[in-house]
Amino acid sequence: MSDAVLEYALKKRAPLIDALKQLVACPSVGADPAMADGMEKARQLIEGRLDEMGFQNRQRLMPDNGSGQPAIFAERLDAPDKPTMLIYAHYDVQPPDPEDKWHTPPFEPVEKDGRIYGRGISDDKGPMMIALETLAAFIAVEKTLPVNVKLLIEGEEETGSPSLPGILQAHRPLLSADAVLSADGARWRPDLVSLNVGSRGNAGFEVKLITASQDLHSGRYGGIVRNALHEMARLISGLHDADGRVAAPGFYDGVREPGEHERAEIQSIAYDGSRLLSEIGAAPHGEKGYSTLERLWLRPTLDVNGMWGGYTGAGSKTVIANEASAKITMRLVEGQDPVAAQGSVMRHLEANTPEGVRLEFTGERGASGAYTVPGDHPLLKAASNALEATTGTVPRRVRIGASLPLTEIVHRLLGLHTIMFSFALSDENFHAPNEFFRLDSISDGLAAWVRILREIAESDVADYAPYRQR
Ligand SMILES: [Zn+2]
């Protein structure tokens, strides 16, 4: 089926690639103050393009305290009775380190074997350019956009979006929309057309265990006092039961058991869990009664990320440690209240601490809940239709075991659901040396973005109302 907008977009593929290379050449490493120029250059390139495209009300949304990296906002409200999409992307990139592991300089994009290499090209500059140039093609051919578009292009994604909640709160009316369409968030696998419908939340803290006011000589005190390392090891080993379940009472409150249909759907996804494990030289392990994908997608977890205490230097030292520490984090699923789940683990540790031993909790990392897109959300339907139309395959609904803070923050603060519609693939070395983006993804992405905007234009504003909160 021919589409004049898509034909135009594909014809403009070469200039798109040139513009993408220019953007990648701006070293927009938000984490590094020495690269502030690169951040500014990236912003100006994007802003210039938005002005050419006739976007209005363009502005930089500043973090509350005036420091940090501004987000770029602009809008075109061309379609009065149509839904409004808040399209998200980010212009900041990960630091290039370790730079000596790159085969070509990270900020000098190079085309090779159907790929372009460069820092930030897959995460998120390539996927962002696909979204922007799709909009440009509509504007060039039809002189208008088929739906209302608000753009939010963030500059702090790679540093954990510290200002995003404040920006969203301060600009709620400006950012009001029917749903969020994200040009960030990689596709799961090259061999599977998929849409991500959920991610796990997380929480965590540090715990210090204290048995005495000082380190003790094992000759003088050995056998008459508790050893903090032994006590910590005992506490940690009591976090899970023999079936791999988290032993803290209340931890699973609100967690829903997967239904027959859900299990069958996951089961039907061709997935070689043993290959994943053999790649890392590990044996399968986990909560009894669940498959690998169920463990990854539907079950909460609890892990110790570090433990320390006592003497760890060269040689030996006959000391009885009086303090031991551990870092503990958890991945949370739908239905779990992150603060309550974290509290249940802290109480479980306390309840199992013997008399005369003290626990101190510090370093709470901030709890965020899991995120799930409602199965019948109109934007999920539009995305699914668009992928089916452009790939010939009904996309599989998948989840990720990691967390996507954007989706949770946007849902909490704007009451909107997000569909990740990036054309990056998860094997493209983002956050690692030799990041690349597949050239094929550009044509695939343009086709899918043209189609999803047409699909959204077919839907009604009222379809979105039941899913919007506030
Ligand atoms: Zn990203």
Image (spheres, grey):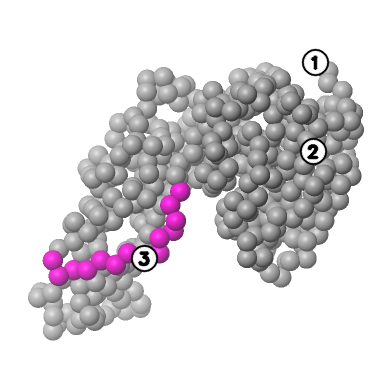
Callout 2 crowding tier (Cα within 10 Å): few <14, some 14–19, many ≥20: some
Give the quadrant of the N terminus.
Answer: top right
Q: Residue at x 36, y 63 (%)?
A: 206
The residue to which callout 1 is attached is 1
The residue to which callout 3 is attached is 362
Q: Are marks 2 and 1 in contact (CB under 8 Å)?
A: no
Can you name the residue that lies furthest to the left here? 224
x and y, in percent, of residue 246 in the image = 28, 45
Q: Amino acid at mark 3?
A: Thr
Q: Amino acid at mark 2?
A: Arg
Q: Residue at x 26, y 44 (%)?
A: 250
The residue to which callout 2 is attached is 76
Q: Earlier in the sequence, mark 3 or mark 2?
A: 2
Query: Cα distance, mark 2 to mark 1?
Result: 27 Å
Q: Nearer the viewer, residue 268 or 168?
A: 168
Report the span colored magenta.
Answer: 355-368
Q: Earlier in the sequence, mark 2 or mark 1?
A: 1
Q: Is residue 151 visible?
A: yes
Q: Amino acid at mark 1?
A: Met
